[in-house]
Image (spheres, rainbow, N blue to C red):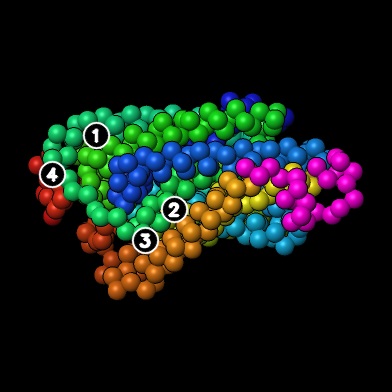
């Protein structure tokens, strides 16, 4: 698709790169919000993230209209958007935020792929942990990260979407089987502000495909169709996320770990879900990491055609991500850190900010106004209802970013009981052996999770301890 893909392929791309790791973490996020609070939060955050996604799409249309150079291939659409809206300093800031988020998001998806692969192998009696399978995930994905851009591997989004929808169907079937045995024994935690902010961070991560959205719109054959693309994408995400989140929380309560897959009691069903999620994540990594790889090539002036330059640069960047994930091999911690640090900027704060600046600048130019762009011109030209909505989104994004980042870093570096152990300490430990590794902490373990208030209810007769 050298001239770009159609809007319905863009729907599949948006859905495919957004769903996945956030999906399996959402039931855990509901624990601090409750059933009603979780329902309201899922609806509100879906609407807000859809709104900000459409702003990014419209921003790109404005840029293509005003600056002819963006009609050609652009490797850094989001930072370029920031540069045109607020200048070089904002372009550099967005550049860092975008690629830090893509870096972290790729690490999250790689950890989830490693976790699910380990679960599958353990299900077949092969001893494996997240740490041992993480390198395998890297080796499998390594050749495929050399593909140029989403327009050149659009087929992977279809496979990722089909695997996700099938996995959700199996998860819901697992809920149906487990409801009678687990629900009567469930308990639900009390509300705490810290846990609530982390839950919001997880939900933002689940809906936050925004770092890749400008790239997806850029590669569309008709970018003006972004509205219908995002409308269908976010309706589909909401319809998948809501039952998985709320019913998972309702049935299993606070026994849910950072991934709902572990709570499914039927071994065969849990193994099938793990395989499907692993397939989705493998393909989604290719979509998510692509903007960072293209930016790295742009930085080192690598040619657009495949060659030794692309192979070296992309290999270095990709393996840095894999080994960084190995340093914090805890799926939940990394989701909260990425979802609560730079992602709120890219999902909630930057899209309306850049939209406001680009739209006001365009109105000043179209009207032939002599006044310069300023706060006064923003107040004059920007619609007041939208300004109020944007301010609300700024406040929400700032709260989640500050509160969740602080808590995530504290739990990692300053907790008396660190949440995870680095894979490096495992790999190079003198006492290393596979049997010991499979008995390690929950962040490395792939055991199934018993339900009930005391996590002591097993519907399959397996030991819970």
Q: Quadrant of residue 439?
A: bottom left
Calculate the distance from the C-alpha at mark 2 to the C-alpha at mark 3. Answer: 11 Å
- Residue 311 spot, x, y in % from top left: 63, 51
- Residue 88 spot, x, y in % from top left: 75, 60
Name the N-terminal-most of marks 1 and 4: 1
Which label sits in the foreground, 1 or 4?
4
Magenta span includes 371 = yes
Left or right, 44 with respect to 299, comes to left
Q: Which residue is tagged 3? A: 194
Within 10 angstroms of label 3, few (less than 14), some, or many (20 or more) residues? Answer: some
Calculate the distance from the C-alpha at mark 1 to the C-alpha at mark 2. Answer: 25 Å
Q: Is disc 2 placed on a helix, strand or loop? A: helix
Q: Which residue is tagged 1? A: 175
- Residue 137 spot, x, y in % from top left: 43, 49
Q: Which residue is tagged 2? A: 201
Magenta span includes 138 = no
Q: Which residue is tagged 4? A: 185
Name the N-terminal-most of marks 1 and 3: 1
Calculate the distance from the C-alpha at mark 4 to the C-alpha at mark 3. Answer: 26 Å
Name the N-terminal-most of marks 2 and 4: 4
Left or right, 151 with respect to 342, comes to right
Q: Is disc 3 placed on a helix, strand or loop? A: helix
Residues shaded magenta: 363-385
Q: In which quarter of the image is residue 432?
A: bottom left
- Residue 446 spot, x, y in % from top left: 27, 50
Name the N-terminal-most of marks 4 and 3: 4
**Do we see residue 101 in this rendering?**
no
> Nearest the camera: 204 or 279?
204
Within 10 angstroms of label 4, few (less than 14), some, or many (20 or more) residues? Answer: some
């Amino acid at each position: 698709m050298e001239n770009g893909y159609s809007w319905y392929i863009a729907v599949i791309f948006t859905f495919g790169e957004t769903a996945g790791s956030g999906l399996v973490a959402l039931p855990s996020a509901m624990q601090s919000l409750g059933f009603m609070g979780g329902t309201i939060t899922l609806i509100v955050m879906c609407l807000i993230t859809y709104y900000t996604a459409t702003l990014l799409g419209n921003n790109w249309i404005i840029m293509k209209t005003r600056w002819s150079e963006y009609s050609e291939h652009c490797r850094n659409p989001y930072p370029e958007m920031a540069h045109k809206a607020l200048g070089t300093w904002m372009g550099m800031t967005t550049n860092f935020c975008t690629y830090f988020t893509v870096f972290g998001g790729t690490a999250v998806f790689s950890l989830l792929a490693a976790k699910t692969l380990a679960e599958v192998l353990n299900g077949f009696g092969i001893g494996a942990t997240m740490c041992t399978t993480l390198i395998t995930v890297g080796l499998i994905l390594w050749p495929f990260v050399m593909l140029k851009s989403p327009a050149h591997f659009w087929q992977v989004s279809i496979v990722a979407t089909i695997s996700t929808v099938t996995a959700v169907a199996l998860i819901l079937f697992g809920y149906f089987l487990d409801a009678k045995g687990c629900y009567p024994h469930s308990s639900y935690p009390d509300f705490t502000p810290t846990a609530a902010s982390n839950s919001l961070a997880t939900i933002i991560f689940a809906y936050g495909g925004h770092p890749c959205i400008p790239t997806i719109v850029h590669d569309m054959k008709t970018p003006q169709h972004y509205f219908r693309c995002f409308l269908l994408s976010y309706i589909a995400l909401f319809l998948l996320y809501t039952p998985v989140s709320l019913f998972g929380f309702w049935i299993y309560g606070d026994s849910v770990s950072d991934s709902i897959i572990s709570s499914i009691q039927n071994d065969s069903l849990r193994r099938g879900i793990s395989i499907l999620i692993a397939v989705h994540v493998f393909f989604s990594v290719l979509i998510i990491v692509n903007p960072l790889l293209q930016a790295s090539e742009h930085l080192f002036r690598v040619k657009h055609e495949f060659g030794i330059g692309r192979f070296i640069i992309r290999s270095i960047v990709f393996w840095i991500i894999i080994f960084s994930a190995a340093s914090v091999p805890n799926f939940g911690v990394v989701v909260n850190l990425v979802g609560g640090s730079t992602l709120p900027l890219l999902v909630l704060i930057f899209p309306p900010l850049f939209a406001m600046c680009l739209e006001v600048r365009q109105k000043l130019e179209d009207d032939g106004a002599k006044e310069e762009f300023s706060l006064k011109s923003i107040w004059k030209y920007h619609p007041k209802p939208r300004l109020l909505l944007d301010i609300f989104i700024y406040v929400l994004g700032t709260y989640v970013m500050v509160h969740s980042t602080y808590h995530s870093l504290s739990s990692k570096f300053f907790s008396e009981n660190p949440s995870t152990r680095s894979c490096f300490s495992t790999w190079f430990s003198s006492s290393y052996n596979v049997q010991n590794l499979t008995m390690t902490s929950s962040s490395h373990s792939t055991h199934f999770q018993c339900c009930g208030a005391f996590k002591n209810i097993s519907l399959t007769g397996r030991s819970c301890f």
